[in-house]
């Protein structure tokens, strides 16, 4: 009777070990395929690295265009401010002239 109890306990331990081994293998396979799928989609997918490389090139060109426009607008602003200052000084001179009407 002790031998059958030992064999029964041994079988239960073996079944538990195989059950947990199977669970661990399934879990590892699931995570492995998940990581592989994520990597593959990132590396080759529609929104992956190739698509991002194209977007980077387009965004760099757009950024360069915006910077060039900003420089142009800043130059125009300087010209307008100089002209405004000149107009204000001419107006002040005209008002302070002796024959100016109030």
Image: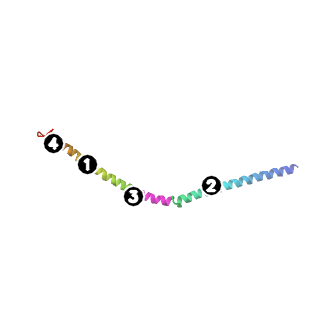
Q: Which of marks 3 and 4 is nearer the N terminus?
A: 3
Q: Is mark 4 on a helix, strand or loop?
A: helix
Nearer-the-camera pick, 72 or 96:
96
Q: Which of marks 1 and 2 is nearer the N terminus?
A: 2
Q: Do the residues labelled 3 and 2 touch (CB within 8 Å)?
A: no
Q: Nearer the viewer, mark 3 or mark 4?
A: 4
Which span of residues is magenta-colored? 48-62
Q: Residue 61 carries which label?
A: 3
Scheme of colours in the image: rainbow
Give the CA separation, mark 1 to mark 2: 64 Å
Residue on which the image places disc 2: 31
Give the CA separation, mark 4 to mark 2: 83 Å
Residue 66 horizontal/vertical position (percent) = 36, 54
Q: Is mark 3 on a helix, strand or loop?
A: helix
Q: In the image, is 50 to the left or to the right of 72?
A: right
Residue 25 horizontal/vertical position (percent) = 68, 56
Residue on which the image places disc 4: 94
Give the CA separation, mark 3 to mark 2: 40 Å
């Amino acid at each position: 009777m002790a031998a059958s109890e030992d064999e029964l306990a041994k079988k239960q331990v073996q079944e538990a070990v195989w059950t947990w081994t199977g669970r661990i293998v399934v879990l590892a396979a699931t995570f492995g395929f998940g990581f592989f799928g994520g990597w593959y989609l990132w590396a080759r997918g529609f929104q992956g690295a190739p698509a991002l490389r194209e977007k980077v090139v387009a965004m760099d060109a757009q950024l360069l265009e915006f910077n060039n426009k900003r420089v142009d607008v800043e130059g125009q602003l300087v010209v307008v401010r100089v002209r405004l200052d000149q107009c204000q000084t001419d107006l002040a001179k005209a008002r302070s002239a002796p024959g100016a009407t109030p």
